[in-house]
Amino acid sequence: MSVIMSLNSGSSSCKFQLYTMPAETVICSGIFERIGLPEGVYSMEFNGSKISETLPLPNHQTAIQILLKLLVDHGVVTSLDDLAGIGHRVVHGGEKYEHSVVFDEEVANDIEMLCDLAPLHNPANLLGYKVLKELLPNTLQVAVFDTAFHQTMDKVSFMYPIPLEYYDQYKIRKYGFHGTSHLYVTQRAREILGEEKSRRLICCHLGNGGSLSAVLDGHCINTSMGFTPLAGIMMGTRSGDIDPSIMAYLAQKEGLSVAQITDICNKKSGILGISKVSSDMRDIEAAIAEGNENADLARKMYVQRVAMTIGSYIAQLGGCDAILFTAGIGENSVPIRQLVIEYISEAFSIKLDVEANQKRRQEVLISTTDSKIAVMVIPTNEELMIARDTYSLYQH
C-alpha cells in the first residue's frame, strides 16, 4: 500500500486529496482558501470527521506546512515518510509534455517558461512543487498537465490561420485545457459502454470554465479551448470565441489597453456579462424563474454555443456514440442538459429520458433506449487521475 497526494495549488488556494494506492481509496481531502489574504481558512475531511479553522495563511508555504502537520497530528499518516508521491496539477505544459512526468529542475524551468500562457495558474502550480521540494526533498513529485490529453490533435485542428512564422517562433496554436478531466470521463465512458460502443465520444466539461472535446478511440482530435482558456464556448466570466477585431475596436472607443480588454473578456464577460446577475448557473436559473430576461438570454446563448460545438464535433468524428456531461454545470444542472439535448435532438435523433435527467452528481444514462446517440452524466475525478499517474511513475 502506498499513500499518494493529489495537489492542486491555485493562486489563493490549495486543494488536496490523499489516496491509498493501488486500491484508490480516499483517506483524506480538503482545501486551504484565501491564501495571502488577512484571514485564511482550511477544511479537511478524514475518517468520517471534518475539521475547519480560520487562521492567518500569509503564503503557500505556511498553508502546506500546516497541511503536513495536520496529516501527522490526526493520524492520516504515521509520518511524512508514508507519502510515496505527490502529484501536482499543472495547467499548461506546452507542446513538450504529452504525458505526466517526474518533476525535476528541467520540468520546473519549462513550466516557468510557459507562465506567460497561463499567468493565473502555472506560477501557482509551480509554487506548490517548490514549497514541497523544500519541505520533503526526498519525496517523488509528479507534474500532471491539463494540456497533455490534447496533444494528440492533428495540425489541421490545432493550427490557427495566422502567418505560419508565429507558430514557428512563438508556438501560437490551440492547446486545450481540462485534459485530465476529459481523459478521466472518456476512459470511464469506455469502461461502461465497452470500446466498440464508445469509439466516438464528445465530452462536455461544463463548469464556471468550460470546454468540449472530440475523442476518437480514446484520443483527442479536437477541443474548444485554444491558445489560452479564454477561447471556445461562453463561460461563467469568459467570453469564449468572439470576433478578434472587437478587442481593438473597444480599446480605441474606451481608451483601454490590450491587457485591460483581455481582463474584461476573462473576468467580466460570459454569463456574468450578459445576465448582469452572476457567473453561477444556479443564480441564473433562479433569476430566470423570477422573470429576468437578461438571465434568460445568457442561458440561451450558453446553450446554443455548447450545442453548436457538439454538432461540429459530430461532423468531425463522422458520427457519435455518446455525449458526456461532467463538471459543476454538467453534473448538476438539469435544465442545461435538457436544453442542450433539445437543441440538437431533431438534427441527430437524440432522445432525452426526462426522468433519468433529474439525477445529479452521479453516473447515469439520460438518453432513451431508442436514442441514436447515448447521453451520459459522468462525474469527473481529476484528483484520481493525478494520483494514478503519480503512482504509476512511483512504481517505475
Image (cartoon, grey):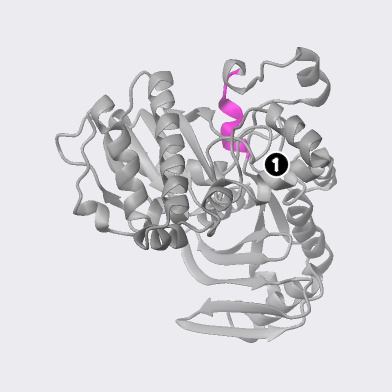
Q: Quadrant of residue 38?
A: bottom right
Q: Residue at x 74, y 26 (%)?
A: 172
Q: Residue 25, how many percent across, how many down?
A: 46, 65
352 vs 57: above or below: above
Label 1 packing within 10 angstroms: few (<14), some (14-19), many (20+): many
Local SS, label 1: loop
**Which residues are the magenta region?**
147-154
Q: Is residue 20 left or right of residue 269?
A: left
Q: Residue 233, how many percent across, how many down?
A: 52, 38
Q: Residue at x 78, y 66 (%)?
A: 136
Q: Residue 161, how many percent across, how many down?
A: 67, 15
Type of the residue with mark 1: His
Prevailing secondary structure of the magenta residues: helix
- Number of numbered discs on residues: 1
Q: Is residue 346 left or right of residue 61?
A: left
Q: Quadrant of residue 15?
A: bottom right
269 vs 317: above or below: below
The answer to whether residue 115 shows anywhere in this view is: no
Q: Nearer the viewer, residue 61 or 335?
A: 335
Task: List the residue tagged with mark 1.
Answer: 92
Asked whether 396 falls inside the magenta stretch, the response is: no
Q: Residue furthest left?
A: 370
Q: Nearer the viewer, residue 49 or 233?
A: 233
Q: Nearer the viewer, residue 161 or 96?
A: 161
Q: Residue at x 43, y 19 (%)?
A: 316
Q: Residue 87, how many percent across, how many down?
A: 65, 55
170 vs 7: above or below: above
The answer to whether residue 96 shows anywhere in this view is: yes
